[in-house]
Amino acid sequence: MAVSCYLGIDVGTQGLTALLVKSDGSNDDGNSNSNSNSSTTGKAKTSLKVLSFGEGSYGFVPDLPEGCYEQNPADWETALVQALTKIQKDIDSDFDSFDDIDIKAICITGQMHGCVMIDRDGKSIGTARLWCDARNQEEADELSQLFGERMPKRLTAARFLWSLKHEPEKAEKCVAITTPAGYIAHRLTSTTTTSTSEDNKIEHKLPPLLLGVGEASGMFPVRECDATSGCEYRTDWIEAFDAHVRTMTTTTIAPSSLKDFLPKIRTAGDARNNRDEHGSDQAVVLNPSILESDGWLWEVRALLTRDRSSCSGIMVAPAEGDQPTALAASLIGEPGMISCSFGTSVVANMVGKSTSSSSSNSKCPEPKNKASSLTAVDRFNAVNGQPISMVWLRNGTTYLNRMVDSYGGDFESLLKQAVEAPADCGGLLALPFLDDEPGLDIKRGGTAMVVGFNSNSNSNRNSNRNSSNSNSDGNDEDGNHRAGNVIKAAMVSVMFNLFLGTQQVEEAEAIDDDDERATTRKEIVLTGGLTKTPQTGQILANIFDRPVRLLEAADEGGAWGAALLAKYYDVCEHDQNNMGDDRSQSQSESEYEYRPPSFDRWLAFLNTVEAEEEQAFYPQAEHVETYRTMLAKYKKLLELQPLLDEVMNGP
């Protein structure tokens, strides 16, 4: 019997990863009704074990001005072929036959907020602008003023507005926009149809593109999701966008409506295809033509043909963004959970409650809390439509790494010293601002520093301590300049900044005690580079005064999350078919009302997934108090940053 497999693909900023997993567990024969809210307690766990992974690399378009970042979509396709070729070779080597594996579904994730413009033939128009492209701050400011809420520069709609102004030749050809992951999903599934007009001209029609709700919310704001119809864009803001474009004097391109360009939104597991808005018993599947001799995936036909003659039946889930997928990969779904990832930049994603309306046509009410207007916070959605508040810090572990380099560069050894250093870092404080930090109103970088060095003879801290105990408080006989103190101070400063950002959200939610969006924060899940030194989770637990769960951060984590979404898509499609079979004989297909999977259906599914080995850390009361005292001092140091900036960088 063939092994049930799922393929996850991650279109990253500098490379693509593909991951093939096999599914073991009771979920393989489907689950209960997709809208069931019954508990999964007591059910056998489902595991997704990695069979093979492959990678492909690409770079940015060269010789662009500073701050401009673009890629050629054809490079993503080449990288995908490279990655799948590696997997195909592994399967050919490890299995007797390709018939021994059965790829049931595929899901693509990737860098959010990019802008791929697509023509009537379904092809990309030139290169694609990426999330890190800095050219549309003016357009983001325009939309912020227009909507009355802060819109991030990364928003795809802001990039499209920039293109309407500055790339009219591309805008004239554009019939749809999507993201890098959305484009790869489109290339795997979509076919254009042709017809002849009355004047005998050949007309091409592109089917609507699909996108996961988390990825879609990075293109344009999404209103509260409805339990009946799923998620939709903010129609009132789309109307405001359209009116704004029509009044612009800087462009002659005025599309009828932005909604005609945006992909249709699907929550995780929503198996409606792109041809039937009222529901369909057929999910989106691979386009067979791409595996023919002249197709762009011909080289990996053996891997992707289910019955060895065609790819019929291999489903493709709507593409999803890397941040929502990372939450899914961490098995985070319940309101109150926080996912923290420490790397070059630092991200905290905070899951909130949904206050969905019973009317699919109702406009999104003004939120009672102010989280969506805070400078450190971006709003988007989880894969099931739940609201997410994202706190993003530009200054992540880079300053920490600089300090490690200055003390010899042995990261593992020096991080161990930092963990063993006293909670108060021997009296040191650090500022990590090598670059600006918009969320904390730090206008410029160049003020990274460590303060508080002392000599033992002048240190009141050590006046009553024996020399034999001098190392216990982080001070040598000649002062507190030990590497562990310095590196820990750099680490703690980043954690303080993250705490201050998340505190903005919590304080805003607490403004109205009756706000049904307000959420009690339960625990933190830590991923990223710091997990290589697990004890850093204890420091984070003490600073946040919350339990911290540590997940191993594998390089292919994004692709694994995509494979998990592919699995869920398969389960829900199975449920949908069962529901369709159970409808009464008097019900026609047009009368049969399909409902997207509920929020709770996704949470129930997550509870069936077997987690990898993990560690848990709990707050230590004594150290919690120490960090509260340090945080008060750190806030005062932050208040001095503008003066330090003036001293170092000029007025």
Image (cartoon, rainbow, N blue to C red):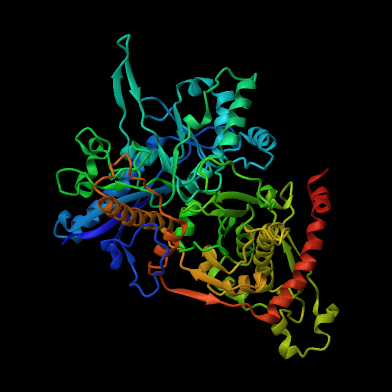
Residue nearest the viewer, comparing 233 with 2: 233
Residue 473 sits in quarter = bottom right
Q: Image point 58% across, 27% down: which residue?
A: 242
Quarter containing the C terminus: top right
Q: Is residue 183 visible from the viewing direction of this image?
A: yes
281 vs 553, nearest the viewer = 281
- Tell me the residue at 52%/27% (across/down): 257
> Along the line of sight, which residue is nearer the eye, 50 or 593?
593
Q: Is residue 34 left or right of residue 223?
A: left
Q: Is residue 121 above or below residue 47?
A: above
Picture mark count = 0
Q: Residue at x 79, y 50 (%)?
A: 645
Above or below, comparing residue 360 to residue 163 in the picture: below
Left or right of residue 244, residue 315 in this image: left
Looking at the image, residue 243 lies above or below residue 42: above
| Residue 11 at least partly seen | no
Residue 435, how many percent across, how many down? 68, 50
Left or right: 144, with 71 as reference point = right
With 557 as the anchor, is 401 left or right in this view? right
Question: Residue 350: percent from the left, percent from the top?
Answer: 58, 59
